[in-house]
Amino acid sequence: MNKEKTLWHNLKLEETFKILNSSKSGLSSQEAKKRQAKFGQNILATGKKFSLVALFFGQFKSALVYVLLIAAIVSLVFKEFVDAGVIFAAVILNVVIGFVQEKKANLSLEKLKSVVKPEALVLRDGKQVKILSQDLVAGDIVYLTAGDRVPADIRLFEVIDFKTNEAPLTGESWPQDKQIKILDKGAVLAERTNLALMGTLAVEGRASGVVVAIDNRTEIGKIASLLAETKEERTPLQKNLDNFAKNITKVIVAIVVLIFILGLLEGQDWLTMFSVAVALAVSAIPEGLVIGVTMILTLGIIFTNKHLLALDSQLFREVLTDPEIVRLTEIAFLCNNAQVANLNLAREDWEILGSPTEKALLLFGILNKHSQKLDKRFQRKQELPFDSRYKYMITRHSYDDKNDILFIKGAVEKVLQFSDHYLQHVNTQVLNSAKRKSFLQVSTDLSSDGLRVLAAAYKLIPRKTLDLAEYKIKPNDFVFAGLMALSDPLRPDTRATLQAALQAGIKTVIITGDNKFTAHKIANDLDLKVQVEDIIDGDDLLNFSDEELAKRITEIQVYARVTSADKLRIIKAWQDKGEVVAMTGDGVNDAPALKAADIGVVVASGSDVAKEVADVTQGTGPSEIRRKD
């Protein structure tokens, strides 16, 4: 039951229920208790809980700290109290800074638990009841409505205008339409539209389905497991300081032993020579090094705060010690939500609510100089909401004394199906087969450029027509008005920023959950000249052995359709090459890679989990300056 390798999106509902030993009638309370006793509660396990005491004393595990502590103890023995005090102060300061950094990183696992809805509406004993989400078991029937946080991974069997926002999990910014059809085995996570995934948010409609995975067997649970297993890399400066401490210790010991032996050979008293040797060793230890480095890093933080970044002092250990940073740029970091440029037209205080698609269309209408006159003339009277089964929506507006006007908006092929004429300037023309194909080709071309394409059409109906809900739409009945293409535009400063990075010797790699064509379009917009066939996707990575990836890692510039595990693997491959790696991201799915990277960069609008593991918080605008606590 509930095997991790089961492809739930590729199974018929009958097969799903058979594997889960359940049905649309749900489970009995007794059966649910048996399953919970066997499989456990629906709680994300975040591994061994960290102890603050253990975390604090763990900061002393450093070669340089060991050397300094020995020097401090020897100074006390020889009553050099000032030296001992300075050394102890340097050690404590270094330990406190490290403790604060790692405490924040460990809290990230706890943040993952907050994505789980505390209650769920289920079918138990033939009745709909609310239970704690932690008491869900595989086979439970769950009901979801707009505003609900999905409490487990659920195979849907009934949907009504149901959409979920999966951006934190998959990186897709568009609310995803859900359906119940069987999908191909190779469908990536973002394409598994017959599943509602734990931690995602229902934004429209309602649905019901059967629980197929709980706790760490869910998709977000797998990310939690990755996060728990991912060790935070020691920074380049920490590694260099440890190597320095080991090397200087070897040199000091060699010199001290040599002086001690030479003294004895010349007839000096062994106790006197021992005192001289110890004093020499203590004086040779650079106890001011830790304080000096800490002061430099602090000044660096103050300086860099003027340049939009909220920084962990730990980050500066990398930034100031190694200029050859490999920056992995996540598409979610580069893009804003769908929008129209130049919106600072005295409306910058507006807060537009709704999906990215609706916001973009609304703002486009606002920019029309005649929008207020049009709104007044064509007053909305009715609306038939978007339905994922039909892929369109219709609104009814007043037109004149005798007629109303219907506007339809939706999938291009659907709107064309309803149209028999098209609008050319101010006249209508017959929509023949050739013209229909040309519109479809334009739509295909726009889609291949990474744009989301919608179509619109209109028709007049008598005012006395029945209620819109009862009105039957007929094929070849509308006038096709045109296509609308929407995009997630690059941030205005992105191209210049990446070009500056390249000029500074920073290798730039794009990692995205989008398909190859969208990734190709974005790469070209950034002047990164790559061919579609050179882009590596998740399936390609799956077929790469670690050895093959290590050989090709420096050649690959763009990755598409990648998972959390893929991102982590890419980071590790670069680090194995000896590179210092910076990773940018914003979602829960980015957290393991952000944690593993030498430098984790998260945008200000990113998820709490991503912010907890990241070293840097990137501001959202040129005037924003924020500092991590």
Image: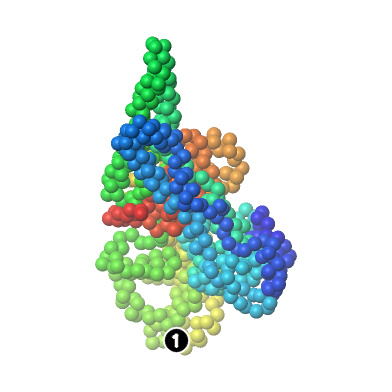
> What residue is drawn where x is 56% and y is 66%?
151
Residue beneath label 1, please? 463
Hey, which residue is sitting farthest top in the picture? 266
Picture quarter with the N terminus: bottom right
The reply, left or right, for residue 64 in relation to residue 420 is left
The reply, left or right, for residue 303 in relation to residue 95 is left
* Res 539 visible: yes
> What residue is drawn where x is 36% and y is 66%?
364
- Residue 325 is situated, as x and y percent measured from the top left of the image, at 40, 39
Closer to the camera in the image, 477 or 591: 591
- Residue 480 is situated, as x and y percent measured from the top left of the image, at 46, 69
What kind of element bears circle 1?
loop
Picture quarter with the C terminus: bottom left
- Residue 25 is situated, as x and y percent measured from the top left of the image, at 69, 75
Closer to the camera in the image, 223 or 242: 242
- Residue 162 is situated, as x and y percent measured from the top left of the image, at 54, 70
> What residue is drawn where x is 41% and y is 61%?
338
- 181, above or below 396, in the image: above
Q: Amino acid at mark 1?
A: Arg
> What residue is drawn where x is 62% and y is 78%?
128
Q: Residues within 10 Å of mark 1 (few under 14, many from 20)?
A: some
* Res 440 visible: no
